[in-house]
Image (cartoon, rainbow, N blue to C red):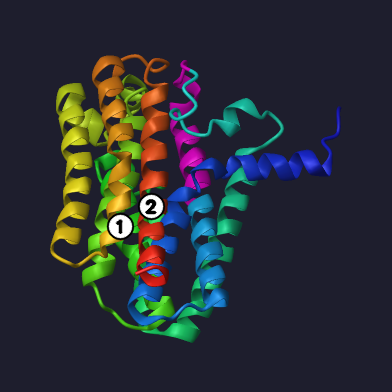
Amino acid sequence: MQRVGLSSKIWFWFKATRFPFFQAAYIPVLIGASIAWSVSGLFDPFLFALTLIGGILLQAAVNMFNDYFDYLSGADQMVEHRNPFAGGGRVLVMERGITPKKHLAVSFSYLVLGSVIGFYLILLRGFIILVLGIIGVFSIYFYTAPPLQLSYKGFGELLVGLNFGPLMVIGSYYVQTQELSLQQPLTASIPIGILIAMILWINEFPDFHTDKAIGKHHLVVRLGYRWAIRVYIASVVTAYIIIGYGIACGILPFPVLLSLATIPLCLKAVTILLKSHQDPMGLIPGNALTVITHLVTGLLIVAGYIISVTLI
């Protein structure tokens, strides 16, 4: 029996976290911290690092829990396409040396480590972080875990948008300022929450028939192709409208206008979705563009806040 080296094991467990999608955690943390710096002039690098690491650990946990419970449901084994953005991580299908029990144990270790950081932040910053943390941990575990299996019942997209949008931005902002001022954090976070939810949304199209067969009735399955496409389009349009509204009303600083530069990327993703929504391989560029749209929009929002402080 061939022994697996330590470096290979470390790489596997890192890969199992689906680290390319960690932007879901670090983008809202960056936005919250940049708003805090812009509004109050406060920025604590230590608290920022704790918030960032904690958020990434919790995202790693939800990704691995998702793979574990999807494996138990049989969903991953039924996936035939090779769209890298859909079908889950499939690590339990593709890596024979990894048992579900080990996978679950590592998933819990990420959850515990993230929670420990969260408890430390609660000691430093108080009750609000506790409330946000409870919502986050509940959502992480029961996203795919029975008995709730929230993503199977059409709540997954909402939870992803809420947790990796408003809750994480507001949490990051509060850690820096200890102020629960919602106007700027909420206005900036809703578009980024919508865009991260749309990553999940478009990634559900390739698994439409598989998910329907195993009873994973997320919103794309519940709505069907036609209405799911319409909701995707309406959602991304709404995200950009909110940014424009926030700037026009003086809620967001003018340099945040930079984030509208991603509109052409988003339009291209819409075009691909309209054409290839039933073609898992043909949809890959649309999946990728949705990921890039979220990433670049978030970074440009952060850049807008930095510019507003340093150059204006």
Report which quarter residue 70 is drawn in: top left
Q: Quadrant of the N terminus?
A: top right
Q: Amino acid at mark 2?
A: Leu
Q: Position of residue 123 (x, y in %)?
A: 49, 85
Mark 1 / mark 2, whichever is N-terminal: 1
Residue for point 35% across, 67% down: 308
> Measured along the vertical axis of the image, is residue 176 above or below residue 232?
below
Q: Which residue is the site of mark 2?
A: 300
Does 187 lie within the magenta span?
Answer: no
Q: Amino acid at mark 1?
A: Val
Q: Looking at the rendered structure, which numbered label has been put on residue 306?
A: none
Image spot of residue 2 (x, y percent): 86, 28
Residue positioned 50% across, 33% down in the render: 71
- Classify 10 Å Cα crowding around label 1: few (below 14), some (14-19), many (20 and above): many
Comparing 71 with 266, the one in front is 266
The answer for how far apart the CA atoms under marks 1 and 2 are is 7 Å
* Residue segment shown in magenta: 62-81
The reply to whether callout 1 and callout 2 are in contact (CB within 8 Å) is yes
